[in-house]
Image: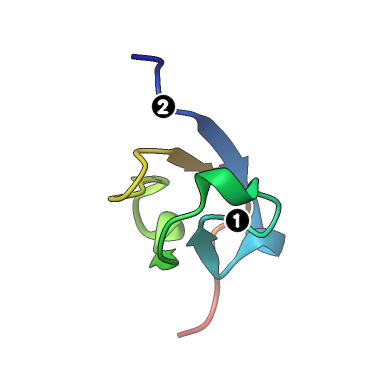
Amino acid sequence: MADPREIEVTEKDLPLHCPTSDAPLWSRHPRVFLDVAQKGEVLCPYCGTRYIYKGAAPRGH
């Protein structure tokens, strides 16, 4: 089995959801929102894609 994908995201990608809008139709699963800014990285529970946050620390609520 191939290793899951790793995708770097920044504040412009927030709120983050998987699959992203540019994902091919064959790889789509139900949309799930992911809190990547909290710990700096998060795994999608459906496909295992690892999202790594490379942006500035979020401000506000």
**Quarter of the picture holding the N terminus:** top left
Q: Quadrant of residue 31?
A: bottom left
- Colouring convention used in this rendered image of the protein: rainbow
Q: Is residue 37 left or right of residue 11?
A: left
- The picture places residue 18, in percent across and down from the top left corner, at 49, 57
Q: Residue sitting at 59 percent across and 66 percent down?
A: 14
- The picture places residue 23, in percent across and down from the top left corner, at 63, 48
Give the Cα separation between the discs numbered 2 and 1. 15 Å
The secondary structure type at the circle numbered 1 is loop
Check disc 2: other Cα within 10 Å, few if <14, some if 14-19, many if 20+.
few
Q: How many marks?
A: 2
* Label 2–label 1 contact, CB within 8 A: no
Q: Considering only vertical position in the picture, is 26 above or below 6?
A: below
Furthest residue to the top?
1
Q: Residue sitting at 67 percent across and 60 percent down?
A: 21
Disc number placed over residue 47 in the picture, else none: none
- The picture places residue 41, in percent across and down from the top left corner, at 40, 44
Residue behind mark 1:
20
Three-letter code for the amino acid on which mark 1 is drawn: Thr
Q: Earlier in the sequence, mark 2 or mark 1?
A: 2
**Quarter of the picture holding the C terminus:** bottom left
The secondary structure type at the circle numbered 2 is loop
Residue behind mark 2:
4
Q: Residue sitting at 62 percent across and 51 percent down?
A: 25
Three-letter code for the amino acid on which mark 2 is drawn: Pro
Furthest residue to the front?
26
Foreground of the two, 36 or 45: 45
- The picture places residue 10, in percent across and down from the top left corner, at 65, 52
Q: Quadrant of residue 34?
A: bottom left
Furthest residue to the bottom?
61
Q: Residue sitting at 50 percent across and 63 percent down?
A: 17
Foreground of the two, 61 or 32: 32
